[in-house]
Image (tube, rainbow, N blue to C red):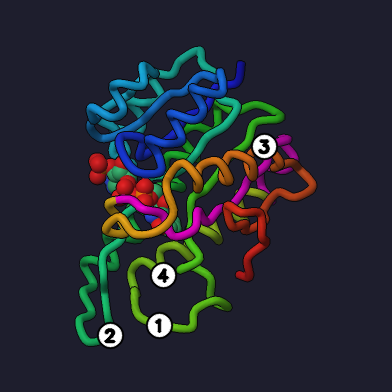
Amino acid sequence: MATYLVTGANRGIGCEYCKQIKDGGDEVIAVCRQSSPELDQLGVRVETGIDITDDKSVADLTQRLQGKTLDVLINNAGIVERVSLNNLDFESIRKQFEINAVGTLRITKALLPFLKEGSKIAIMTSRMGSIDDNTSGGSYGYRMSKVAVSMAGKSLSLDLKPKGIAVGILHPGLVSTRMTNFSGISTAEAVQGLLQRIDELNLDNTGTFWHSKGEVLPW
Ligand SMILES: NC(=O)c1ccc[n+]([C@@H]2O[C@H](COP(=O)([O-])OP(=O)(O)OC[C@H]3O[C@@H](n4cnc5c(N)ncnc54)[C@H](OP(=O)(O)O)[C@@H]3O)[C@@H](O)[C@H]2O)c1
């Protein structure tokens, strides 16, 4: 039985990850700021009070995990706020960086001691963070923070390859969650594809940017 840790686990894609991993017979540690009825009903281990922007709360998580080995770390927590050129809100841009990019790197670094040779890290980025694919502009904070987290993922893939840890940089598709005002494909369909990508992730393809459907995306 493999152990998966999922951040942003209380709703949306994160909660669906927990459901499908549990249904597949593996162990889930669901990490969130606060739980939800949807997550509680899954009957998985839930670790609450963890904000990925906060050093102390991430350190607290590492205390709670003592003795555990993680086979897969899924960095799913993230936010989107609309920031257009006509309404450049630098505070919002900073906040999106802090959560989507810096927060993801903070918790990944803190959890490295729990990973072993053969473990995997998945980073939920977005196609909105593809420079080549940007044909519509706007969304300054979200796009910039997702480019940054994709770059962190690429560096992690190179730095962790000698330790036998593979890193996948994943776009789920447009998925019906609170983030998208519930437009797009179901979380069930997205997570089915995402878990396939994680299954296929290895040291030869580490550092690749994939759509959940399997297409390699341009940087
Ligand atoms: N939905 C899409 O179409 C789409 C497309 C591309 C990429 N993505 C990415 O997929 C991931 C999941 O998105 P989603 O659609 O499931 O969004 P969602 O329903 O809005 O869920 C976001 C999750 O992130 C958590 N989170 C936010 N800030 C946090 C913080 N500071 N510390 C810890 N957790 C925090 C939220 O927890 P709280 O409930 O405590 O706020 C929530 O669990 C995100 O990284 C997103 O950028 C989504």
Range shown magenta = 158-177
Q: Is residue 61 magenta?
A: no
Question: Horizontal placement of 96 versus 150: left or right?
Answer: left
Query: Which of marks 3 and 4 precedes in the sequence?
Result: 4
Q: In which image quadrant can residue 145 be found? A: bottom left
Query: Which of marks 1 and 3 precedes in the sequence?
Result: 1
The residue that mark 3 highlights is 199
Could you give the CA–CA distance between mark 4 and mark 3, rounded to whole angstroms?
Answer: 27 Å
Residue at figure coordinates x 43%, y 28% from the top left: 19
The amino acid pointed to by label 4 is Arg
Which image quarter holds the C terminus?
Answer: bottom right
The residue that mark 1 highlights is 137
Find numbered disc 1 in the image and state the secondary structure of the residue it sits on. loop
Q: Nearer the viewer, mark 2 or mark 1?
A: 1
Residue 158, above or below 2: below
In this view of the protein, can residue 101 be seen by the observer? no
Query: Which of marks 1 and 2 precedes in the sequence?
Result: 2
Q: Position of residue 195 (x, y in %)?
A: 58, 39
Query: Which of marks 4 and 2 precedes in the sequence?
Result: 2
Q: Nearer the viewer, mark 4 or mark 3?
A: 3
Count of numbered marks: 4
Question: Horizontal placement of 42 versus 151: left or right?
Answer: left
The residue that mark 4 highlights is 143
Q: Position of residue 120 (x, y in %)?
A: 63, 36
Q: Position of residue 37 (x, y in %)?
A: 23, 27
